């Protein structure tokens, strides 16, 4: 009898010359992922937890810059136990994570009970954190921590500690707010939905500002300064407007492109106020730097109320949830996503 495992599969089809993507939880043969002798430096992981990131939604929706081969199992994050290894670095029983790597884009990802990855993508579970909490952070939280670390390194050149965070109800934005609040910054959350204010105040935001108030009607090249720094996930018009609101020697840190890849800005904030724009590429982070970041997450950055930053779903629930989000995004209607991170619980051990 063939052994099977569960995995979310994205299938591509064409209707009236228009691509459609169907999300199905399937039972796949274990032979798909078994380690063979020629799989040098490959490791087989039993996945305990994963998490939903923006890239996962793009992959599920067939974005050609993210995923081109179907059927496909998305999931750029995974945490679990090594059950087989052709690597000298890992052995059966090791607890390990995959974060900020190419997994789940054009290779099978973490939305499955098992995943096989090269050992170069794998990190040992950092000391002081559980498999579960490592995925509460995941790629989104790790990227936020890189932004916070850079902000900390530049804090002496800033006039104050007033920081704006965009994408505040998403995983990266929410965790950035929590980490900044713990470090004593005065945080303004930028949000498009006023009903999320209680959540944002609960995770550490001192103020909440409407996204629409920032991007509607502002035509000046400079605005009265309000912030010393910005951590931005949006890009596009929102980041352009926030650059105008930075104090002298202010810092903007770009971590994403949810609002678009364009940046319709002007040079005056740079040459009259001496502001800086820093980009974060989490995937290129060295393993030495990764270890340092996880140590800071555990010892310095982690909010005391981490349980407020995520909601948990099962692998069984995941296809319907992702399908609803994708349908509403295509219809350009409001997406009632859970606030903060979405944690995917796949097995019960080491919770």
Image (cartoon, helix red, strand yellow):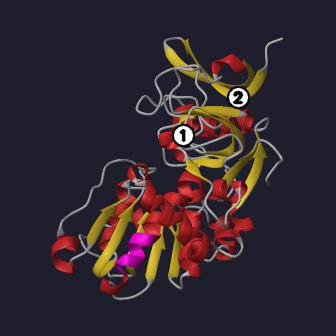
- 150 in magenta: yes
Look at the numbered discs 1 and 2 and tell me whether their residues touch, using CB distance below 8 Å. Answer: no
Place of residue 116 in the rendered image (x, y in percent of width and height, measured from the top left)? 60, 31
- Relative to 293, 80 lies left or right: right
Label disc, if present, on residue 88 of the rendered structure: 1
Q: Residue furthest left?
A: 271
Q: Tell me the residue at 46%/71% (across/down).
A: 148
Q: Is residue 181 depicted above or below 338 in this figure?
A: below
> SS of the residue at dot 1?
loop
Residue nearest the observer in this picture, 321 or 153: 153
Magenta-drawn segment: 149-154
Using the image, tell me which numbered label, if any, was put on residue 7: 2
Q: Is any part of residue 335 visible from this angle?
A: no
Image quadrant occupied by the N terminus:
top right
User: Percent position (x, y) of residue 135?
Assistant: 65, 53
- Residue occupying the far front of the picture: 88
């Amino acid at each position: 009898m063939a052994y099977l495992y569960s995995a979310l599969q994205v299938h591509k089809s064409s209707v009236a010359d228009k691509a459609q993507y169907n999300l199905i939880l399937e039972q796949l043969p274990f032979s798909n992922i078994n380690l063979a002798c020629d799989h040098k430096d490959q490791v087989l992981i039993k996945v305990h937890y994963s998490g939903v990131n923006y890239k996962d939604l793009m992959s599920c929706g067939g974005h050609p810059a993210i995923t081109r081969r179907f059927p496909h199992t998305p999931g750029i994050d995974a945490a679990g136990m090594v059950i087989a290894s052709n690597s000298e670095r890992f052995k059966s029983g090791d607890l390990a994570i995959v974060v900020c790597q190419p997994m789940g884009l054009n290779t099978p990802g973490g939305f499955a009970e098992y995943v096989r990855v090269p050992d170069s993508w794998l990190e040992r579970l950092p000391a002081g954190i559980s498999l579960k909490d490592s995925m509460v952070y995941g790629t989104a939280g790790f990227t936020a921590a890189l932004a916070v670390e850079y902000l900390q390194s530049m804090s002496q050149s800033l006039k104050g500690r007033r920081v704006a965070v965009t994408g505040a109800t998403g995983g990266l934005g929410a965790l950035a707010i929590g980490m900044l609040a713990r470090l004593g910054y005065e945080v303004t959350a930028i949000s498009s939905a006023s009903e999320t204010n209680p959540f944002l105040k609960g995770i550490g935001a001192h103020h909440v500002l409407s996204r629409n108030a920032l991007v509607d009607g502002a035509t000046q090249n400079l605005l009265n300064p309000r912030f010393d720094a910005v951590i931005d996930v949006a890009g596009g018009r929102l980041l352009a407007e926030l650059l105008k609101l930075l104090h002298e020697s202010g810092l903007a840190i770009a971590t994403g492109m949810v609002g678009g890849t364009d940046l319709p800005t002007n040079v005056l904030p740079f040459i009259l106020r001496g502001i800086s724009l820093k980009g974060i590429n989490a995937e290129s982070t060295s393993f030495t730097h990764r270890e340092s970041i996880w140590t800071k997450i555990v010892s310095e950055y982690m909010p005391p109320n981490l349980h407020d930053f995520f909601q948990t779903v099962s692998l069984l629930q995941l296809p319907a949830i992702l399908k609803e989000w994708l349908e509403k995004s295509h219809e350009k209607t409001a997406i009632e996503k859970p606030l903060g991170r979405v944690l995917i619980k796949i097995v019960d051990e080491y919770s």
